[in-house]
Amino acid sequence: MNALPLGVLFPILAAAAHAQTVTASFAAATAPVVTTTVNGVSAQLSVPPGPMGTFGVLVAPLTIGPNLVSSRIVWGQGTTASSTQTWLEHHLETSFTPASVLAATSEFVITFTATSAAPASFYLGSTTYTSINAPLPLVAIDVDNDGSIEYPNFANGLTLHVPLLPLGAAPVAVRVIMSSSVSGPGYSSTYFQIVARPDNDLMLPQNALPCSLGAGELPQPVPVFADRGVDIQALTAFGFPIVLVIGLSQQPVLLPPYQGTPCLLIPSPDVVLWAPSGLHVPLPASVRPVTFHVQGVSVTPTALALTEGWTVTAW
């Protein structure tokens, strides 16, 4: 095995992954309110401005006979190594009486914070479903919470990419103003989300096809916040173990056919690892620029089968 590539690669592979996390928090800039009125009977619920929990539901329900009429606001978040997702929802629904008036208003500030510098891209999206008697909801976005509404009409199924906001110990805040209503039978449902993903200056092209479905899979390496690196996870087929072959160069080798299909191994075999729980490859500034190649080798009872292959280039 080539000692020079090992000397370069092993410090990368063995580097301790920083326990970097990107978190999101919610605060109500004004008191969110939900109101439900049916035949002159009203239910209303509000909470004061200030910090909100990670997940929450604000609902004003009325039960009319067997039917439930409600106005509700939902918020929440989910975090993985490769993204932090937040969402806000307005749901108003009544289907049986014209004497119904439903409304929901909210103004949330969503704040993203990282434990260390983490260049990130933000993806904003919305989906709205409305019936008759329900006007298009208001969704207005102030990207940096400076009092200026950059996107005043964001409810109509839009998606927006906001690249390279400086995410770190200094928070990035986004103010989201939402308002929905229904007058009479109908519904209004709006889902808004912000997803923060790492912007790691990577190229991740595929360089090889699997030689059989029985080889398992090697999905594209996933950029993660920790160390500006990637996570690599092979998916086995039929329980056959998969080892990862990692090399700093391409050194194609044609292996014996598996199930009648030729198998071409692309990376030079500088590092061969069995990583059943996945592999994290840190790519801090100290190792950049760097390019390496990775492919999975499935060890079957009769032959070696190859997964997809990928090239990872970090600037």
Image: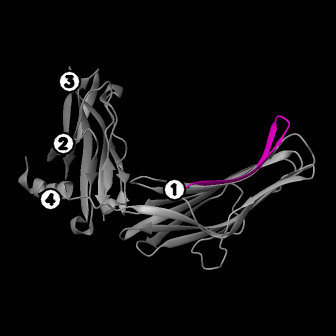
Magenta part of the chain: 55-70
User: Which disc number belongs to residue 8?
Assistant: 4
Label 1 packing within 10 angstroms: few (<14), some (14-19), many (20+)? many
Which structural element holds mark 4? helix
Reply yes or no: does residue 38 show up in magenta: no
| Mark closer to the chain start, 4 or 1 | 4
| Mark closer to the chain start, 3 or 1 | 1
Query: How would you classify the magenta stretch by its main secondary structure?
Result: strand
Which residue does the numbered mark 2 point to in the structure image?
273
Q: Is residue 279 above or below residue 45?
A: above
| Mark closer to the chain start, 2 or 3 | 2
Amino acid carrying label 1: it is Gln
Residue 295, given in percent of the width and then of the height, sits at 26, 41
| Mark closer to the chain start, 3 or 4 | 4
User: Which disc number belongs to residue 303?
Assistant: 3
Which residue does the numbered mark 1 point to in the structure image?
85
Circle 4 or circle 2, nearest the eye: 2
Q: Residue at x 45, y 56 (%)?
A: 83
Between the C-alphas of marks 3 and 1, the distance is 42 Å
| Mark closer to the chain start, 2 or 1 | 1
Amino acid carrying label 4: it is Val
Label 3 packing within 10 angstroms: few (<14), some (14-19), many (20+)? few
* Image quarter of residue 217: top left
